[in-house]
Image: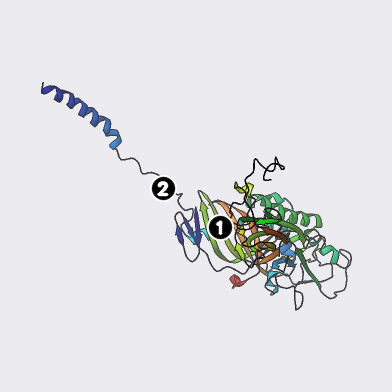
Amino acid sequence: MPRRPHALVAPLLVLALVSCTPTTVIPPASPPSEEAPLFASDEEALAAATEAYEEFLAVSSQILQDGGEDPERARTYLSDSVFAEELAGYEQFSESGFRLIGQSRITNSVLQQWSQYETKAEIIAYFCVSLEGTDVVNGSGESIVTADRPEQSVFEIVLTGSRSDLVIESKQVWSDESICG
Amino acid sequence: MWVRNATAAILLGTISIVIIASPVKASSICTDSSWYVGGCPNIGGELGDDEALLTGDLDGPGGGNGGGGGNGGGGGTPGIHVPSTPRLYEPCIDIFEGFCAGIRPGAPGEPGEDSDPITLSDVEAFRPTPPVQFMQPDGWMVVGLPTNFYTTTSAHTVDGELLGLAATVRFTPFSYRWRYGDGSSAVLSTRGAPWSTLGLREFDATATSHIYRASGTYVIDLDVDYTAEYRIQDGAWLPIPGSLRLPANRLTATAGDAVTVLVDRDCATAPSGPGC
């Protein structure tokens, strides 16, 4: 009589221990509730934005140097709405027989802010861009640049996308050139 | 979500923000092609008494006038000076259609003498839709019971054109100033709504109701304050500093005392019934 409970308890204990064993394994670390930041620092975000904007400027300049030919080259760097605006300009170059000589260059950049949602980033930065040494000529080789064209401008550029695939969502001119130094 | 800023980071749960002192203000869109040829237009906004004014000129950012806005008054008109020679910016005709084309002297490509500079500037007024106010009951009130005032004005856009570009101004109401005509007034942040919309019964109190304490005829005025933003083409919305105050229609209504009477049935369905 007093042995029966023991006989029952022992297997139950073993069963209980066995059944508990898997759940006592330390689970793998759960993924962080938030995506890791795409950029380790502000400098890194600005560098990515600068690289993307520089690539666009180079391609855009090339299109204009080619007289507006093959404007689709710029599409991958721009949002649909920005591309539509630029496309109109490229087409006017083509129709008018204009051609760009030289290329703009970024002389300074300042980060305004960057943000991240899941794996997508948005970077807003200001760029001082110089037109020094550039010209636009018509089919006769005459310059059509206006006499008081500013030699440098400040653009506020908004880029969105993944770290390696940033697209220009907006580009606007700013009236303050203080970042140009 | 992450937001980072260049000088300070504020962590708000999963959000961090960084903001730097930024350049003064944004201008309008600027394509690479137009920029290479002649710079980009400066466009700014300002608010008048009952309208938003957008000002635009083809003075590039280096023009030194601070860019747009605030040039409607004294002083010379800022703007780019384009020589009337074949060097005139040809794409301008299309990019700023209707503006450049209307001003440019001489035929395209025709050599000409340099003349006085042409000022390419433009001002466009955008007027919001005036607010309309209503009251319940319509045209009368019961002394001692809430009268419900409300307006239907809401955020709305007005389209126009500046420098040949599509321009839109968005007006958003944010403050409602009622003067009830009995010496009292209220500045509210809600426009109110009809009793039925609010799911209330007649003479229930609302966020915009008012109780008159004496019988008589009252004149009710409402002014609505709006903020304004503008955008060029499909660009980003840019705020216009300040606010606009627009008056609504004036209401005149009579307040009377109510007497409670026991009736046989609803007087609306049986107007000749006892007590009606």
Q: Which residue is mark 2?
A: A32
Q: Is residue B101 left or right of residue A178?
A: right
Q: Chain of mark 2?
A: A
Residue at x 65% of width, y 50% of height? B194
Residue B46 visible, this orientation: yes
Front one among B12 and A152:
B12
Q: Which residue is mark 1?
A: A123
**Label 2, label 1: how many angstroms apart (C-alpha)?**
23 Å
Secondary structure found at label 1 = strand
Residue B71: image x %, image y %? 73, 73
Number of disc labels: 2
Residue at x 74% of width, y 64% of height? B37
Label at residue B109: none
Q: Amino acid at mark 2?
A: Pro
Front one among B112 and B45:
B45
Q: Quadrant of residue B207?
A: bottom right
Q: Is residue A50 left or right of residue B166?
A: left
Front one among B183 and B206:
B183
Task: Specify how the rendered protein is coloured.
Answer: rainbow
Q: Amino acid at mark 1?
A: Ile
Residue A181: image x %, image y %? 59, 73
The numbered mark, 2 or 1, whose residue comes first in the sequence reads 2
Nearer to us of marks 2 and 1 is: 2
